[in-house]
Image (cartoon, rainbow, N blue to C red):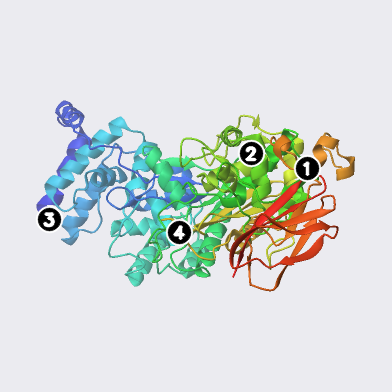
Amino acid sequence: MRAHHWLLCLVGLLFLTGLARDRFDAWVDATNLPPLLSEQSIEMRDREGALLRVYTVADGRWRMGVRPDQVDAGFLDMLIAYEDRRFHRHAGVDPLALLRAGVQMVRYGQVVSGASTLTMQVARLLEESGTGQIDGKLRQMRVALALERHLSKEQILELYLTHAPYGGNLEGVRAAALAWFGKEPTRLTPAEAALLVALPQSPETRRPDRHHARATDARERVLQRMRHAGVLSDEEARAALSEPVPAARRPFPALAPHLGDLLRAERPRQLRHDLTLDAGLQARLEALATTSLSRLPEELSIAIVVADHGTGEVLGSVGSGSYGTARATQGFVDMTRAKRSPGSTLKPLVYAIGFDRGLAHPQTVINDRPVAFEGYAPQNFDGAFRGELPVAEALRLSLNIPVVLLLNEIGPAHLMSVMRRAGAEPQLPGDQAGLAVALGGVGVSLNELVQLYAMLAQGGQARALHWQAGEGTSPGSEVLGRAAAWHVGDILASLAPPQGAPEWRLAYKTGTSYGYRDAWAVGYDGRHVAGVWVGRPDGTPVPGAFGGDFAAPILFEAFQRLKPQADPLGPPPPETLILTIAELPRPLQRFIGRNALFEAPSDAPKLIFPPDGAVLQAADSLPVKLRDGKPPFTWLANGVPVRLGEYRRETTLPAPGAGFSDLAVIDAQGRTARVTVQIR
């Protein structure tokens, strides 16, 4: 040790006196500098700059870039006063400090104070070299002198603030401030600043979570020296000494993990990603997802998206409720981007297209009756038929047959075109869209579904949803007319909220895919749009998973987490026709469809009971009921007349034998209605 320090003193004297100046300069200039650009943690920040998520570097360390102007000025004053008082005046090596250290070592026979400058410490950190060996110390001095010739003092200080060790896998003052105090180092108390000055001297033995007493003593020494140096007043030092030292590390922010993973994979060299998300809302939505999953069957996942439909900015995005948890069997799958069957959630879009093209109006009467299209015979969810009813009521009841009738008139290809123009990329099971797309026979993601509803909320104007700040500033494109979009929103807003939900007027729709694989709810108010998906990422059926039961309550709760009350929906555009059925133009009073010439007239006879396909118990007689038609009526069973000249619309027929039977009725004008029943 003694030879070590005498040699340091000699180097200092050479530096002071300028001996062998030329050779010394050449020696410094020939220094091979270590890489100055080290890998830094990638950060995700919200719309206000708050940290959403930060990633470790390849070796698992938290190393976050920071400039001196981003650090509390009081901390910088303490750091320089404690570690390197002449930092701004020396050239990398402080000869006065070298002389002082050598004299003290000779006088006391041991190391009393060190001579390492902040620049020398930066050299050691960049090369990850030790401090105790003579060759290592000389190398640090040489690198420090060379660094001062290539970098400014601010750049050297920035390297120290980024690489200084703070215990465990913490590097740099930002990582330390977040881990020990849960905040950025822009504003620190004197007590916090003193702890951050003390830790790098012995980061492992002074870790507050493992050696709390040593950390407290080290901080006290820094505070006392700062008081003697005049950096702190006596009052400030006493107040700082009374402030407790943290006893545990705080977790780093880890919000929006799926979105963060996506952006990091897309742009791995970009250190900072500024997002449109709201950190507070994101945290509340993730808590909602976790709480909701705890009330649902095992192995279910959940996804939530909330956006401002006026700007297209995504404010919250939850890909699952179990990322990185014990329940995360499939929680790493981002279900906001997965293509799934949307169930009935596309029905409003079909009706909006029909309104926009003048094929129907909310008060237009449509017939919910048995239909077949070249072998495709859609059925309502409950298997029943409602007969004639207004289109608005058909949408409110989410009936299948009326929307398929309307889509048959529009054409499935046109629906696909509207979806693509609105920004979605629907995934078809085959190459050609069929009528089943109206009932969910197409793949869309939650992000795309929310974007479709954002288009409806914006009066038919499509604006791409985005989550990176600065994107989406271009004006939206018109996909549908304002009146058509308003009609759909007005109908959906008349739906009652789920049981127990607040009486908010949201225009919303639920959906359940075939086989109970996906439960959906998506809706909007005057400013925001949100969507919820619940299911299993692997597509396994979940018996009883209805959108109205599983997803709709979460949708309303998501709006509650967003704001205290709903924003009102906009008024109808001037061109909107708000009329009764009697006031509608005659072609809009009743939906006819392209096959009208081949369909029975509306006043043709209709068998009301028994319904087609009914299974009946054997009895002596069979009651029948008829609506419309002109009497007298002729009744037939299996082609054989059994009632002639019948004027009543309700009667009984001799019961046919067991098995399947065809029942038919012919009115006075020769118009026929028939059903097939089974007698047991």
Residue denoted by label 4: 536
Mark 4 / mark 1, whichever is N-terminal? 4
Tag in front: 4 or 1: 1
Q: Secondary structure at mark 4?
A: loop
Mark 1 / mark 3, whichever is N-terminal? 3
Q: CA distance from mark 1 to mark 3?
A: 110 Å
Report the front residue among 299 and 609: 609
Tag in front: 2 or 4: 2
Q: Which mark is on residue 408?
A: 2
Q: Taking 73 as reference, is 588 left or right?
A: right
Tag in front: 2 or 3: 2
Q: CA distance from mark 3 to mark 4?
A: 67 Å
Whether tag 2 and tag 1 are in contact, CB under 8 A, the answer is: no
The answer to whether residue 564 is visible is yes
Residue at the spot 53% in from the left edge and 70% down from the top edge: 295
Q: Residues within 10 Å of mark 2 (few under 14, many from 20)?
A: some
Tag in front: 1 or 3: 1
Q: CA distance from mark 4 to mark 1?
A: 47 Å
Mark 2 / mark 3, whichever is N-terminal? 3
Q: Taking 671 as reference, is 194 left or right?
A: left
Q: Amino acid at mark 1?
A: Pro
Whether tag 3 and tag 4 are in contact, CB under 8 A, the answer is: no
